[in-house]
């Protein structure tokens, strides 16, 4: 068992483009989410579509442990190949616009998973 957090993000939203870079609290939404996930002490990987690779650059301040770029249209494939490349199992899935991340709840659910599968 090698659990890890995979944050799914994209910049190309039709309704609200680049929403992950919007202001939230004292910084930006994506930095808050990564920071909260890192408090679990688990690997944190940001998975994005390949088309966003050139747009992301150094725009993420607190940086995940790794970046993964995959399919633009197939989110499941992006998660699968990201997990495979980083040997993550089980995957803790986090969306990049889910600002209500609680590290203690992530760890509690991971313990429940281990206990009950």
Image (tube, helix red, strand yellow):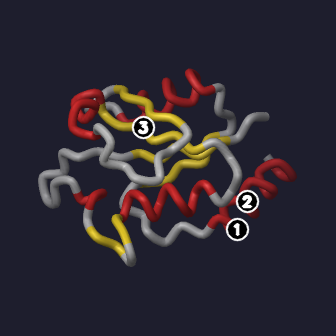
Q: On the rendered image, what quadrant is the N terminus found in? A: top right
Mark pair 1, 3: CA separation: 22 Å
> What mark, if any, has residue 117 been given in the picture?
none
Give whichever of discs 1 and 3 has the lower sequence position.
3
- The residue most toward the left is 14
| Position in image of residue 66 (x %, y %) | 51, 35
Between residue 75 and residue 21, name the one nearer to us.
Answer: 21
Left/right of residue 69 with respect to residue 14 in the rendered view? right
Name the residue tied to disc 2: 107
**Crowding at mark 3 (Cα within 10 Å: few <14, some 14-19, many 20+):** many
Name the residue tied to disc 3: 47
Q: Secondary structure at mark 1?
A: helix
Name the residue tied to disc 1: 104
Left/right of residue 44 with respect to residue 40 in the rendered view? left
Q: Which residue is depicted at the point 49% across and 24% down? A: 81
Left/right of residue 39 with respect to residue 16 in the rendered view? right
Q: Quadrant of residue 86?
A: top right
Q: Given contact means CB atoms under 8 Å apart, are the residues at marks 1 and 2 in contact? A: yes
Q: Secondary structure at mark 3?
A: strand
Q: How many marks can you see?
A: 3
| Position in image of residue 116 (x %, y %) | 83, 52
Q: Quadrant of residue 17?
A: bottom left
| Position in image of residue 49 (x %, y %) | 30, 33
Q: Which residue is depicted at the point 36% across and 64% down? A: 29
| Position in image of residue 33 (x %, y %) | 47, 61
Give whichever of discs 2 and 3 has the lower sequence position.
3
């Amino acid at each position: 068992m090698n659990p890890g957090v995979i944050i799914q993000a994209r910049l190309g939203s039709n309704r609200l483009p680049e929403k992950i870079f919007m202001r939230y609290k004292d910084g930006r939404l994506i930095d808050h989410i990564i920071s909260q996930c890192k408090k679990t002490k688990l690997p944190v990987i940001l998975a994005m579509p390949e088309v966003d690779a050139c747009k992301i650059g150094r725009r993420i301040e607190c940086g995940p442990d790794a970046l993964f770029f995959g399919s633009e249209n197939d989110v499941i494939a992006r998660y699968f190949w990201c997990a495979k490349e980083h040997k993550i199992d089980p995957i803790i899935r986090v969306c990049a616009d889910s600002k209500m991340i609680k590290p203690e709840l992530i760890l509690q659910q991971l313990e429940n998973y281990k206990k009950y599968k």
